[in-house]
Image: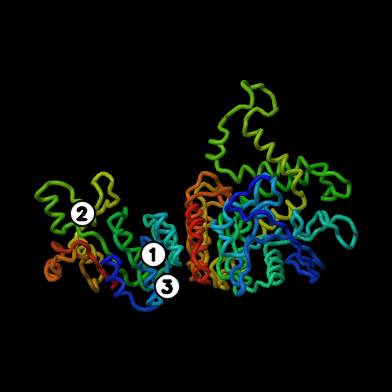
Amino acid sequence: MPELPRDSVGLVTPQTAHFDDPLSLVCGKTLPAYDLVYETYGTLNDERSNAILICHALSGHHHAAGYHADDERKPGWWDAHIGPGKSIDTDRFFVVSLNNLGGCHGSTGPSSLNPETGRPWGPDFPMVTVCDWVESQVRLAERLGIQRFAAVIGGSLGGMQVLQWSLAFPERIANAAVIAATPKLSAQNIAFNEVARQAIRSDTDFHDGHYADLETLPRRGLKLARMVGHITYLSEDAMGSKFGRDLRTDDLNYGFGVEFQVESYLRYQGDAFSTSFDANTYLLMTKALDYFDPAADHDGDLAKALAPAECPFLVVSFTTDWRFPPTRSKELVNALVRAGKSVSYANIDSPHGHDAFLMPEPRYQAVFAGFIDRIADDLGLGPRNEEAARAL
Amino acid sequence: MRSDLTLIYDWVPERAKVLDLACGDGTLLHALARDKQVSGYGLEIDPDGITRCISQGVNVIEQNLDEGLANFEDDACDLVIMTQALQALRRPDLMLDEMLRVARECIITFPNFAYWRHRVHLGLRGYMPVSKTLPHAWYDTPNIHLSTFNDFEALCRDKGLKIVDRAVGIKDHEGRLMSRLWPNLFGEIAIFRITRD
């Protein structure tokens, strides 16, 4: 049995919470009942004050840290930052990570069975938004006995959920970390999402979303969607240094097969994703991104929209992120300043583009750890384990 | 705390809303928040300084001062503080305008180039001064706009700004009286408190 790393949360088992209270959604529909699958790391203290909620991004899920099995090849998607002595220190904090409604990793979504028909929801699954997710996350918190999170943290689409938490439930969130996010999508962001959606919807195997009924999958469409998405996650430099113009074979073959390494990489990523992710979920998640715009109800004035927030914010961006570039984070920071809120902002130098938020990077980890340590101080949770801190 | 920060600490009124430009590791803002219920933000570009601010709960925003303060509204604060950064800016005069747009009052400290030791360095030895307050060589110094106590007073006069208070930071063994009488000669660090009118 291979040994798990010492700074890992170790083996984790996902749990499922079932909810029978109907959830009214922003789109006007109601979800009568639903499941949320989640994982927890660390221990909730007696005061129930040390809980941190992790919100996931577009293709994320509940498995943020640790391993599901001894022989699992890769740990959870944010394992670089969650664990004993890591930035989000599970020695002192109780971390909750869930799969959002509409997801395809265990929480109720388009691939779940619709109790009314006994068949998969498919395209009939109601459109869910960031606001709906946060509502459902509050219910999960209540189920776990958490009245107030010490922090809610998320990157990209996850950062939007954090922002929504601070606005809709200011009394339930003590600190907010919004990482590589944006207060709203730009026209270019929406355009990329629309290309992805059209790729899926125009796949002949999509069948208007009823592919599950017909026991087929819109693999080509989902693959294309992922390929175009993936380009936006990397920086030009990262792609250049990773692949350059490297060829797979010695010579050009003047055809349309895979010639350049970057083509091979994108196809591989697309293929892997097309069988592991649900196309209807992908469509929903991209729409949730598009719709998010808290300033819309306030004549586009973000500072006004931020008025209800009470918690201190940490906003982090990455220099080469061109999907949600530093200017978008700065837009949020400036609005928070205008609204008189507590905020700190760091723009981390990284070559990895949007994906940088998932990776370990010394300055990113130091900023993150400083933020978490201050929260631990406020709560009297004691200092970081010395030995573990040295390894940071 | 650095001697110029100690002096500024005393000058800042309780519950003031402060913007600290080039706030470093947040020592001043942290002390002001703790003892005087002062709120506000620090601007900084040094990564280690930013991290230390965050870890002690000081609001810090990564922002290059040469890009101005356009993200702060007119009269957004009661007081803008800038310690030991004026000389490193591309246009100190424009920054002064910006600072006094964001707050009615500001406190500025900078190394006084006319300090007698600097004069000795340049006047007698013929080398660009290197000292504790100006530790860099001429070719790699971030201090691109060195000025003197007198220069700054002249700039304030030209701009019609009111100097409410001025002081000098000095080495402990040098006379306080001397620096009070001849600040341009005996003041190592110039400290000004100015208002718009």
Task: Kindly identify which residue carries mark 3.
Answer: B39
Q: Is residue A217 above or below residue B22?
A: above
Q: Is residue A144 visible?
A: yes
* Mark in the foreground, 3 or 2: 2
Which of the two residues, A388 or B50, is positioned nearer the viewer here? A388
Is label 3 on the same chain as label 1?
yes
Please state if B100 lies on the left or on the right of B110 as rendered. Answer: right
Which of the two residues, A96 or B187, is positioned nearer the viewer here? A96
Task: Kindly identify which residue carries mark 2.
Answer: B131
Q: Quadrant of residue A136?
A: bottom right
Q: Whole-percent x and y of residue A379? A: 53, 71
Q: Whole-percent x and y of residue A318? A: 51, 51
Point 16% across, 54% down: residue: B118
Point 74% across, 48% down: residue: A277
Alpha carbon distance from label 3 to label 2:
34 Å
- SS at badge 1: loop
Nearer-N-terminus badge (3/2): 3
Tag 2 subunit:
B
Alpha carbon distance from label 1 to label 2:
24 Å
Query: Is the residue marked by circle 2 packed among few (<14), some (14-19), or many (20+) residues within 10 Å?
Result: few
Amino acid found under the numbered disc labelled 1: Gly
Point 80% across, 58% down: residue: A125
